[in-house]
Image (tube, helix red, strand yellow):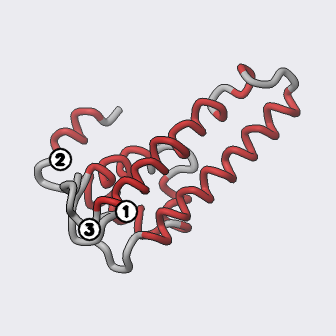
Amino acid sequence: MPKAKDPLLPRFLKTLFLITGEIYPTFTFADLPEEWVSSKKAQDELKTAIGKFRKELWSLIEDETPRRAKWVLGSRFSALDLYVAVMTNWGPGRDWFAGHCPKLAAIARRVESHPRLKPVWKRNDS
């Protein structure tokens, strides 16, 4: 995480809050729609709407990630890159990210192959 006076801190916080406060909660509703609405039709509509919203949110992060960036913040590795690596394995999935958010897909692959993180990734991959 950037330090208090680092010019990257506002962008870091904005992206962190978008991931943790907007994207992450979509799984609460889309994974078990039957807990929120009773009819099968409403459940399907809820899942579809949330899936679309989640993609829009990821696209915002993709758009704000610098071109040819090695990491979400550009040249600086941060916790955001870890979130991206993990969450790109969830819905909408790696194929969608490769086609629609290629910068984030590349960052996820970079995190997974990072020499210090590769053993952790392998140990926790199931």
Tag 2: amino acid: Leu
Q: CA distance from mark 1 to mark 2?
A: 24 Å
Question: Circle 2 sits in a helix, a strand or a loop, which is it?
Answer: loop
Tag 1: amino acid: Arg
Of all residues, the one furthest to the bottom in this rendering is: 67
Q: CA distance from mark 3 to mark 1?
A: 8 Å
Determine which quarter of the picture holds residue 41.
Answer: top right
- Residue 82, percent from left and from top: 30, 48
Tag 3: amino acid: Pro
Viewer-proximal residue among 43 and 112: 43
Nearer to us of marks 2 and 3 is 3
Determine which quarter of the picture holds residue 57.
Answer: bottom right
- Crowding around mark 1 (Cα neighbors within 10 Å: few <14, some 14 to 19, many 20+) is some
Q: CA distance from mark 2 to mark 3?
A: 26 Å
Question: Circle 3 sits in a helix, a strand or a loop, which is it?
Answer: loop
Q: Is residue 37 left or right of residue 31?
A: right
Viewer-proximal residue among 112 and 80: 80
- Residue 104, percent from left and from top: 41, 63
Q: Is residue 66 left or right of residue 59?
A: left
Q: Which residue is mark 2?
A: 117
Q: Which mark is residue 11?
A: 1
In what quadrant of the picture does the C terminus appear?
top left
Q: Which mark is residue 7?
A: 3
